[in-house]
Structure formats: C-alpha cells, structure tokens
Image (spheres, helix red, strand yellow):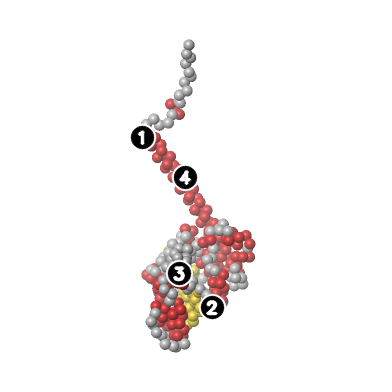
Amino acid sequence: MLQSRPDMSIPEKDRGPSQPEEFLRLYRQMETLLKEMRQGVERDWQRAQDTVADLIRTQTAAGMAPAFFSRKRPWEANAQLAAMIENGILDHAAFPQKMPHILSFYRRLLTSLDREPTSILEIGVKGGGSAAMWKGLFPSASVVGLDIKLRRWLTRQPSEDGVVYLAGDQTDSARLGEIAAKYGPFDLVIDDGSHVTDHVAGTLRCLLPHVRPGGIYVIEDTHSSLRKPGATRSNEQYGEDIWPDFVVGVFERLRRGVLVPASPGAKLAAAVSGMIADLVVSAQVMAIRKAEALE
C-alpha cells in the first residue's frame, strides 16, 4: 500500500511573488533601498574625507608656518607625516603643492618685504594647502584662494583655516575684476593656475593694476611652456614661451633701453613695464614688484 508523503510545500506566507508585476514591485523597492543605503554611505565617507582634509590642511599649515623661514622642507621634521605623504596615504591635495626650490624662493622674497602683507590672492589653490600656509604665516592678512574647480572640502563656508575660497576661471577678466574690487588691492598675488601662456599673460594684465605699490606679483612654473607635447601627464598644451622676451623687454625698460614690441613677450612687457619697479627671476618662477607710481 502506498503511503502518503508529508506536505513539503512552502507555506503561503513564505512564498515569493506569484505574479511578475508583484516581483517587479518588490525588486524596485529593494533597488531603491539599496540606492539610499549606498548614498548614505557615500555621504558619510565624503564627510570623513572632508574632515580629514581640513585637519591635514590646517595642522600642516600651522606646523609649517613657524618653520617656513628656517627649513627647506618643513614637513620633513615629522618622519611619520613625511612617510604618509610619500606613500600617498594622505590626500596630497590638502598639502602645500610648492616644490622645495619654490618655497626657498618665497622665503627669500617675503623676507625682503618692507611690511607684512595684509591682503593675499592665490590663483590655483588645488586642495588649499598653500593658501592655508599663507594664512598661517600672516594670520592678520586677508587671504583669498581662487580655483576653477574647488575641492569639495573648500566649498564649506566659513573655511576651517580662515581663507576665503572662491570658484572662478582666471581667463574670466570680469570675475577677476569682481574679486579685486571686493578683496583688493593686494600686497601679494600668486599665479599658480593653469600655466597656459595666454591665461597667465591675461591675468597679469588684469590684476597687476590691483597690486599695491611695493606689492609683489608672482608667476609660478614659467618653464611650463617648454614642455613638449606628449611629455606631460595630461598632455596639456601650454602655448608659446614668451617669458625670455618678456624678461628682456622689462630689463630694457628698467635700464631705459629701446623697447621693440616685435614678439608677444615683448608686447606684454611694453604693456605692463610701466607698473614694474623690480623683476626677480629664478628657476621656474619670477616675481614683479609693483612700482610706487606709474611712469
């Protein structure tokens, strides 16, 4: 005689959706829930990243400022910090992006000032490391940092380091004019932006009039236009190398020689040389000291 088997069927309450429409509805609910969970995790992770970046930027600037004029690589005094930077454990963008020889140039330059700067503008702040360093060096100064695309942790206002961070393109002369009108005139302007020749030249024409007499205008990475196509990481084109002719043109004006505006560099020199009292040229960087009065 055959014996009946126990009922092994799944209870009604534990069964899955029996209709395709019900299955799709549950699937969409699950997809929405997972999306919300993922967004929440991403928000928490970004907040943590931003907090660490703020801490790195402010503490590094505070630590570097006292040592800025006495050591070539101030952060090397801390072996653990230097190792974390070297190994890429910490976000490099939050640290000052100046090479040691550039920092040495700034030390020589800033010690020659007649008085401490009270207003500073830096173009191209990346993660804010160097802008925070200027604020650490000159805490009573108004420091403005401009970048075409601000890192996320720099968009929170007020900033942790006391710097005013603004989004803007250095090729936008109207935007530069607005900033100069609100925050200038400046004792120190630093162009560490795109390094594209036309951009740098246009920014110089626009902002040099907004530098106080005796103030300094710095152009970094003047060697960029020497890089050949394909030789850079991003394969960028920096344009014509105008700086040799610019330097010669300014020199001729300072020694009351003959200006021959035959090249873009010489033309730029002719346009701004009347505002220049001194020109300091070093490896990959140069500084203009604004004349006391236009000649």
In the depicted structure, whether residue 42 falls above or below residue 152: above
Give the residue at x 43% y 39%.
30
Q: Nearer the viewer, mark 3 or mark 4?
A: 3
Q: As rendered, which of 232 and 139 lies closer to the eye?
A: 232
SS class, disc 1: helix
Q: Nearer the viewer, mark 2 or mark 1?
A: 1
Residue 111 rendering spot, x and y as whole percentages: 56, 77
Q: Are marks 1 and 3 in contact (CB under 8 Å)?
A: no
Instruction: Kindly identify the amino acid type of the residue bearing the numbered disc 1.
Output: Glu
Work out whether residue 115 can be spotted: no
The Cα–Cα distance between marks 2 and 4, rounded to whole angstroms, is 55 Å
The Cα–Cα distance between marks 2 and 1, rounded to whole angstroms, is 76 Å
- Return the disc, 3 or 2, that comes first in the chain's sequence: 2
Q: Quadrant of residue 171?
A: bottom left
Q: Which residue is mark 1?
A: 21
In the depicted structure, whether residue 12 falls above or below residue 76: above
Instruction: Kindly identify the amino acid type of the residue bearing the numbered disc 3.
Output: Lys
Instruction: Kindly identify the amino acid type of the residue bearing the numbered disc 4.
Output: Met
Q: Which residue is mark 4?
A: 37
User: Which dot marks residue 228?
Assistant: 3
In the depicted structure, whether residue 53 falls above or below residue 67: above
